[in-house]
Each structure stands twice: as structure tokens, then as C-alpha cells.
Amino acid sequence: MKTLVLGLGNSILSDDGVGIRAAHEVANQLSNPQVTVVETSAAGLSLLDSIVGYDKVIIIDAIQTEKGEAGQIYRMGTADFSCTKHFSSPHQINLVTALELGKMLNLAMPQEIVVFAVEAEDITSFSEKCTLEVEKAIPIVVKMVLEELVS
Amino acid sequence: MKKIMIDPITRLEGHGKITIFLKDDGSVANVYFQVPELRGFEKFCEGRPAEDMPQITQRICGVCPEAHHMAATKALDDLFHVEPTSTAKKLRELLYSAFYVTDHTTHFYILGAPDFVMGPDAHPAERNILGVIGKVGLELGGAVINTRKQNHWIIQTVGGRPIHPCFGLPGGVSRAINEEERAKIEEIAKQSVEFGKVSLKVFDDVVLKNKVYLDMVLSDTYTQKSYNMGLVDKNNKVNFYDGKVRVVGPDGKELCKYAPREYLEHIAERVEPWTYLKFPYLKKVGWKGFVDGKDSGVYRATPLSRLNAADGMATPLAQEAYEKMYSTLGGKPANYTLATHWARLVELLYAAERLLELSKDPEITSPNIRNIPTAKPDEGIAIVEAPRGTLTHHYITDERGVIKKCNLIVGTTNNYAPLFMSIKKAAEDFIKPGVEITEGLLNRIEMAWRPYDPCLSCATHALPGQLPLEVTIYDAQGNEVKKLSQGV
């Protein structure tokens, strides 16, 4: 099975870089030729370009929820975002719309997409480091992704 | 006093909050537009080698990294007092043209087209790219995806990496292209020219042939008579990569034309107590508040303003499209905000034609891609046109080339004042006493800001990667009386 691990984020904007940092670590600990690890700041249609042709995609990203605690990790499927799929983003389309578009255009879409999201604390300060609790979450989310890959 | 909030918050993205205060009679009292500040960028850059700036600055923005990479690379040329080779300049412009094709394509089909193809009052469930493709056809949908994909291949091939290029160096670029790559770029450029023509035809069929839409484009609600800014070449034609910044008034008269090194003589920034944003304005005219007209220093830096500020396009098909646009809109300059979508498509065609020209240039495969700098660095300033407006990078370093100070005026920043004014005018015109505030009405207010496609704090990847919209209406006592929400 051709699998893609996609770390999303901005590597110089504190906790916004958690997905990139985690994906980098996954790549370091992995030696499976069937798995590709990519770090990207892409969104919307560019995300669609990245995932076409893979059977399974694991996305690692930051998230901010109303009551979440920094460093908390959520494992989600795309269905968790289905309520948002018909609304456009400021510049792009969201993940679910991108997937729907891919199906509409008969592109080779992944059968399964799993999202690991890490609750962020600071996403507006320029820094190459994450905040303390998010930093602590990185090895945990890396382990979860590695387990997901063998499941 | 009632309060309406348009509060587009994704879970990570910069909050762009529009708050509309109503009078007791239901008409608009005032409008505020706020975004949070990204902190510490200057400090982050201080003490780093200037050569890192093309890599660092392109990470500020998730939407137009290529524009920052290009501005930073040109600022390094200036900083190290080195002129790039002719081939290096052409390769940079080639990559930049491919980037414009992808960016303008994305904007038009994702953001611009749904309002017109599906209609401004269409349900949000249909007013999106899926609805557009459903109506205009799968073939066009495939062309959108393919044009972006192919031009991203050019960016990756020439720039060394997808999304974040790594080829800009002071005095040139890091890699030449070979004949095989050149031939493929030429083929992609030809397809992109065709795609540009098709996109203008879509606009023609959907917007121009529909009197209701054309009237909306020409309506006073979406009209703003501000100054126009854009980079021009020596013939005053639109140029994205290089040239001088020309500013033309709402009456079409040139106010000034300046080289990057002179930008501080022409641009100042206004600070308001209610927002972190700074509002740039034209020093020569002065800040007169959030008003348009030639006595107000407010200017726009958008695809439309670039066309208004220039005397034409440097490629034949884009020039034809340029002339058609102005003859339809009743001459130059055009001050119709919604015509920005049209101008963007003229620019898309220009970018594709320029890409084709450059791909056929006999020098483009030359290995002579860099002049090595020998002078001591001190200060570097450069300007390019980012898709969302004129982009200025300014660095001061010590003699080792370590950053002491940096200042950036990013594309969207130029447009903060006019953007705010466009929203306010639309809100005032649509929200009237006794008029029910519907989704369609709010969308018409959003349509005033969509042509600018503002980059607020661009973490566009953020989950769930969309823009929830919440509108809350408060009565005079601050009690919530109605709430409309989409995707929250």
C-alpha cells in the first residue's frame, strides 16, 4: 500500500510548525520504501496535488479548538470535517472540498485519510521552536503515526 | 446600537474580524476591520545571514512564497551590489510567470468565479468550486487542475523545490535548465496561453453577457476612486518582476514613478488605535482618513490598479484583452472593485504569454547563471509585484552581511485602507433600515473584499482549512438577537 505522511504547517511560526517537526521525526525513524514523508505549507488545491496517487494519507497538523489544552492530540478522519465542506477558505478550498473535487474529476484519490492534530498554544509569534507542552507532544504524535503505519 | 460581526476564524488562521455597528434604526453606524499581529518577525531575522532571507521570508506567507523569495533575492542583489546575469534574470522571471499562472488561476476559479457562475445569492453549499465545475463543465475543472499542476512542475524544476523555491542567490540563480526542460516549459506555456484565453471567455460568457452582473460591476457600491499602484517596465507596461513603481491618480494622471531605493520618500504608514494594522498612504498627497478621491493618499495595489497604473500589457493577446476591458468599462482608469477579477484574468494571460516568450529565449538554457558578488554588503531594497500587491523588501546589514534591520511592506498591507473602505461602503449600501440580513446580503458585502484576496496572517494550511463565518446581531443593550453561521 502506497502511503503518504504529510506534515503541514509553518516551520517559523511557533506551534504552527508542529506538523512539520513531527513529520521530519517520522522520516528519521522510518525505513519503509512504501511510505513517503513530505513536509509542506500547502493548502487546498495544492494539497490535492500532493495526495493524488496514494492509497493512504496521514496528515499531521496543528489545531486550535475552543476548549482544548496545548499539546492535546486528536486522531480524526475526514468525516470530522464534513460539516465544513461547503465553505471556502480565505484563499483556498478546504480539505473535504478538495477531496470531493478530486473524485469529481476522477483523480486517483486515497481510500483512507487520517489526520493527527496537535492542539497549539502560540501560532502568531515567529520562532523555530514550539511552546513547551506542544514540544512534549511531538514524540507522542510521532509514535502514534508510526503505529498507524503498521496497523 | 446593534452590532453585526463577520468573524472568519479558522482554528489556526489569523482572525480577520469585521464588525459592523448599527444605529437604532438598523442602518450602519460604523465598520471595523481587525486582524491579529504576527509578532517578532524583525527580531527573528536580526543576527541571521542576509542570504537566509529568501528562505525565511517565503515562509511568512502560505499563499505567495514565490513572491517573497523573488523580492528577497533581488534585495540581495542590491545589498551585495551585484547585477545578475541576463539568463539569471530571465530564469527568475520565467519562474515568476509560472507562479502567477498558478496563483491567478486559483484565485479566479476558487474565489472569484463562484459568485458569478452560481450567483451571489446562491446557497453556500453550491457557491464554490464544485458548483462552478458542475455548471461550466468537468473539462474546464480538469484544465484548472492541470494548469496548476504543470506550472508547479515549472516552479519545482527551475526553483529546485515545490512551493518554497531555493534557487535565488545574490547575482543570479543556483541552477541552469537544459534543452529537454526548456522544451517541456514551452509546451506548458502554450497550454497556459490557451487556458488564459478560455478563462477570459468564461468571464465574457458568465459576467459580461449578463446585464445584471455587468451593472453590479459598474455600480456605485463597488466603485472606489483611489490612487493606483503598479510596477511598470521602461515603456510603462505592466511588469511583475522588475521596473519602477508608478502611481496614477483616480483621474488617470501620473502622480509619481519611483525606483525601489526611493520608496520611503513616497510611502508612509498611518497607525489607528483600533487595529494592529498600519495603513500605508502616499506621502505626497497625505493621509486624509478613510476616504477616496485625489486629495486622499489612499492607494490600491491590486491586479486592477496595476493595469490602471500602466499604459498597457507587453504581450499581444493580453494587450488585446486589456483594450477590450477598458473599452467595456468606459475608459481608464477603471475604479470598479469587482473588475479586479477581470484584470486578474488579463494578467493571467499576460503571465502565460510572457512564460512562452521566455521559454523560447535563446539565452534561457545558457549556463551563465550567476555573477559572484565581490562588494561589501550594506543595504538592499527590492520591489516585485506579488499577486496581491506591490511587495517591498528592505534589509540593512553589517559588513559581514548579517541582518541588523529589515522592513517589509507586503502586498495586502498596501490595500488595508481601501479594503476597509470597500467593505464599509458595501455594508452601508446593503444594510438599510427594515432590510432583513440574509446570507446573500452578507455575501454581497464579502464580495467587496474578495477581489483583494487579503493575506491576513497566512497560515492557510490550518485545520480545517476553511473560513467559518459567524454573524451575530446585537440589540442596543448588547443582547444577541440573531445569529447566522456557516461552517463554524
Image (tube, grey):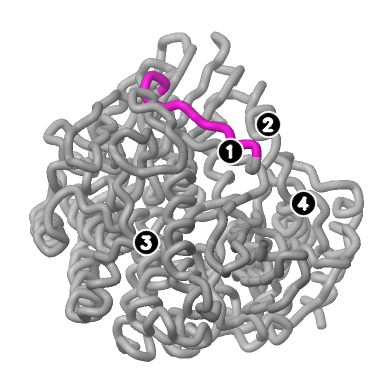
**Residue A122 x %, y %:** 79, 49
| Distance (Cα) linking label 3 and label 4 | 29 Å
Picture disc at residue A107 = none
Q: Secondary structure at mark 3?
A: helix
At label 2, the amino acid type is Phe
Instruction: Please tell me how crowded label 4 is: few (under 14), some (14-19), or many (20+) other residues with Cα within 10 Å.
Output: many
At label 1, the amino acid type is Ile
Q: Is residue B180 visible?
A: no
| Distance (Cα) linking label 4 and label 1 | 17 Å
Q: Where is B142 relative to B243, above or below?
A: below
Same subunit: marks 4 and 1 = no
Of the two numbered discs 2 and 1 on the same chain, state the one appearing first in sequence: 2
At label 3, the amino acid type is Thr
Mark 3 lies on residue: B102
Of the two numbered discs 3 and 1 on the same chain, state the one appearing first in sequence: 1
**Residue B15 x %, y %:** 65, 56
C-beta proximity under 8 Å, tags 2 and 1: yes
| Distance (Cα) linking label 3 and label 2 | 30 Å
**Residue B164 x %, y %:** 51, 49
| Distance (Cα) linking label 3 and label 1 | 22 Å
Q: Secondary structure at mark 1?
A: helix
Mark 2 lies on residue: B44
Q: Secondary structure at mark 4?
A: helix
Q: Which residues are magenta?
A: B264-273
